[in-house]
Amino acid sequence: MRSYRRRAMLLAAALAASAGLPAAAAAHGSVRVQQIDGRVSHYDDVRLELSGNTLRVISPDRVGTLVVDKAACSYVGSVQRCLPYSLTLSQHGTHHITLDRGTVYLNLTSRPQTLPLSSRIVPPRGIVALLRTHRGTFISITGRLDEVNQ
């Protein structure tokens, strides 16, 4: 239990680092973290990078990085839908966070796309993700990808 709390605090600290700093010129993302006890934190101006099957969410000061590894991807129209299998926080060491489930939607086109069976629109080069940790913390990521290396 203490290990989970420590990881949750480190995750919140990494994302909090992005909240009080000025935005990087190319940063176009936001992260919302809802703890199991109901506390909600919102962080803007994070950098989103996609390289192969790895999504990196980087704080503007580049101190904290949340790494989401995705697998089992398929296309629904022009939107890529992936199921992530690994979540790692890199800040003052590497901390593996047990992922319960989640979905990552990617729009790698130059036009807005609507999510299937939804009114939600994913912007060009955009991302919408919802992750749930094993302990019940929800992490949502939205924004435009700053860098894509396929």
Image: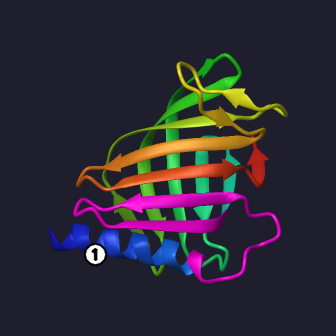
Instruction: Looking at this view, name the residue that lies furthest to the front.
Output: 119
Name which quarter of the figure residue 127 lies in: top right
Q: Is residue 102 left or right of residue 133?
A: right
Q: Secondary structure at mark 1?
A: helix
Specify whether 128 is left or right of 108.
left
| Residue located 67% across and 36% down the image | 122
Relative to 25, is 68 above or below?
A: above
User: Would you say residue 42 sits in the magenta stretch?
Assistant: yes
Residue 4 position within the rendered picture, expressed as x and y whole percent measured from the top left: 24, 67
Which quadrant holds the C terminus?
top right
Q: Where's the N terminus, which quadrant?
A: bottom left
> Is residue 137 or residue 91 the one in the foreground?
137
Q: Residue at x 46, y 81 (%)?
A: 92
Q: Amino acid at mark 1?
A: Arg
Q: Which residue extends farthest left?
A: 1
Q: Position of residue 63 (x, y in %)?
A: 59, 79
User: x%, y% of residue 36?
Assistant: 24, 59
To which quarter of the image does residue 29 belong?
bottom right
Residue drawn where x is 28% and y is 75% of the image: 6
Q: Which residue was labeled with disc 1? A: 6
Asked whether 24 falls inside the magenta stretch, the response is yes
Side of 33 where 52 appears, left or right = right
Residue 125: quarter of image = top right
Say few, some or many: other residues with alpha carbon within 10 Å of mark 1 (under 14 / 14 to 19 / 20 or more): few
Return the x and y of residue 55 as percentages of the image width and height.
60, 50
Picture layout, residue 115 above or below residue 143: above
Magenta-drawn segment: 18-46
